[in-house]
Image (tube, coloured by chain):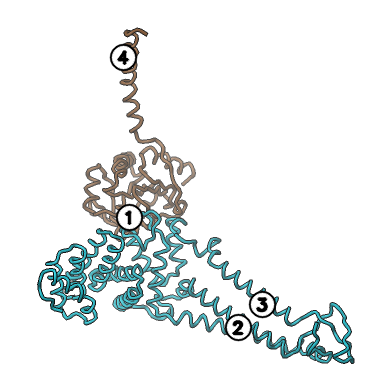
Chain colours: A brown, B cyan
Amino acid sequence: MSNGQKRALIAAGVVVAVLVLPFAIALATRPPATIDAVASPLVGKPAPQISGKSLLTGSPVSLAEYRGRFVVVNFFASWCDPCGQEAPELDSFAYEHRDGSAEVLGVVFQDESSTAAQFLQKTGGTYPAVQDPGSKIAIDYGIKGPPETFLVAPNGMVVAHFDGPVTRLGLDSYIAKAEREGL
Amino acid sequence: MSSAGVTAEGVTAERSEFSGKSRYQIVGVWVLLGAIAAVTMYLGVHRVPIGAVNARRIAQLESELKCPVCNDISVAQSEVKVASDMRSQIASFVNKGMSDVQVEQYYEARYGRQILLSPPRSGFAGLVWVLPAVVVVAAGALGGWVLFVRRSEIEMPVPAVGTSKETVTELPNQKVQLDPKRKHKNRWVLVTGIACLIAGLSFFVIRTLGGSSQSRLPSGSITGSTKLSKGQEVTQLLADAKILASDGRYPEATNAYSQVLAIEPRQAEALAYKGWLLQLAGKAGNDPKLVGQAASYERAALKASPRYPDAAFFLGSIELEDYHDVPAAITQFNVFLGDSPSPQLVEIAKPEIQRAFGAEGKPSPV
């Protein structure tokens, strides 16, 4: 192979790399469209009660008041890196369902109220989140480490449990599945 | 085979007696055994003070439940917040009268079976707790029965009626009873053996599953009649913690102090002695973090009760032994000696105080 041919081959390789690399990066960093639910003894059972004051507004919040709508219960903490990844997705999900078809309810896991509130402001989270004194809510939901998320059906039953970051599309797919099952 | 003591008259008399009198004897024996089991269980339940029983049950549950956010360590061993909250919750459940099984089921319903470090006490897996006792009872009963049958009914020659003891004609496969006196003795050996077996098993069952039987009663006590006030609960827990610490059962004593602090977060004695136990654990495990926590507890105890000599001594000890800060240790020892400490604690503190003052070239006040 002549020097000219070698240079042409290298140049072609570089061009291909330049074209392919952005796609590869985009695909690698894009949130997955599907998320996998994991087992939980709570699935198929009534969701344990959640109530408290919203970290951002101070107004009273309770899971019971969302009866009749899908609710995404998300356990998070400011010190949890994956929570930072999923927060924009949850905010996007909350915005998508601003008509009231579904709600997001955050629960602080082992974190100070002030730092958790700062975390929500920083990540753009506008959905209500409550503090969990005595870890009662976390124990009731069997939390092993944030982020953990539960999907609660309009009838108040837990339909799915996710261990790790969730995505808007993934949550939507589980809601669609639950609706198909008549929940 | 010897035929000593066996006569045809004896056999006939024994057979006729067995059908009527023996039946009542057997019923009487079983009534007696039932009474022994009942009395043993009653004594087993009531011989331990309520608070000590609850403290022991709480410590046991904490060691059987896994810390949910940790790697295979129990709630008792973990210092993370959820584990600490679970400890408070367990203490509260037990004091409210929930049984051990109910407490375990509460966590299992939320976390799944993996929250239990030992097999559950209910359901199919719960058989592992019961089967050994059942096997022992069954083996004992079978063994006893075989012994009874073999000793009381022996294949031996039956003398023909009217013949003398010396002229015996053998008739194989006919059963005869032993001499009534010997049979009676065998029966009482058997009864005593079964009674001992039942008594031992009763104690075993109470000690293993004691919590579940006690707390079926409605209130926070095993008698079902007394509900302790918060003050009484704290006093009881502090007494339990002292006993546990003096027995060298430090993790359980630490848990008892933690329970006090769950009720009264500024209780000086619980703060000071939990700090002392953390210091011991920190030294044993060469863990400066635990020693740091110990110092924080002592400072919190002194903040809650500035004239509490025990906390001053413990903090002085940490300053001297762990931080090697002799002047700070001497300051705390002076506070300790100025606050009317108990003579026993002064005796314990003496070597450290002498060492601290000696290191500064000062005469020791003790």
Q: Is residue A7 above or below residue B6?
A: above
Q: Type of residue at label 1?
A: Ser
Q: Is residue A57 above or below residue A177?
A: below
Query: Dot 1 surroundings within 10 Å: few (below 14), some, or many (20 or more)?
Result: some
Counting from the top left corner in percent of width and height, residue B55 is at 38, 73
Q: CA distance from mark 4 to mark 3?
A: 94 Å
Q: Which quarter of the picture shows residue B363?
A: bottom left
Helix, strand or loop for disc 3: helix
B144 horizontally vs B104: left or right: right
Residue identified by numbered label 1: A62
Q: Is residue B97 above or below residue A49?
A: below
Q: Which quarter of the picture shows residue B328?
A: bottom left
Question: In the picture, which quadrant includes the C terminus of chain B?
Answer: bottom left
- Residues tagged 4 and 3 counted as in contact (Cβ below 8 A): no
Residue identified by numbered label 3: B144
Task: Identify the disc placed on residue A11.
Answer: 4
A180 horizontally vs A52: left or right: right
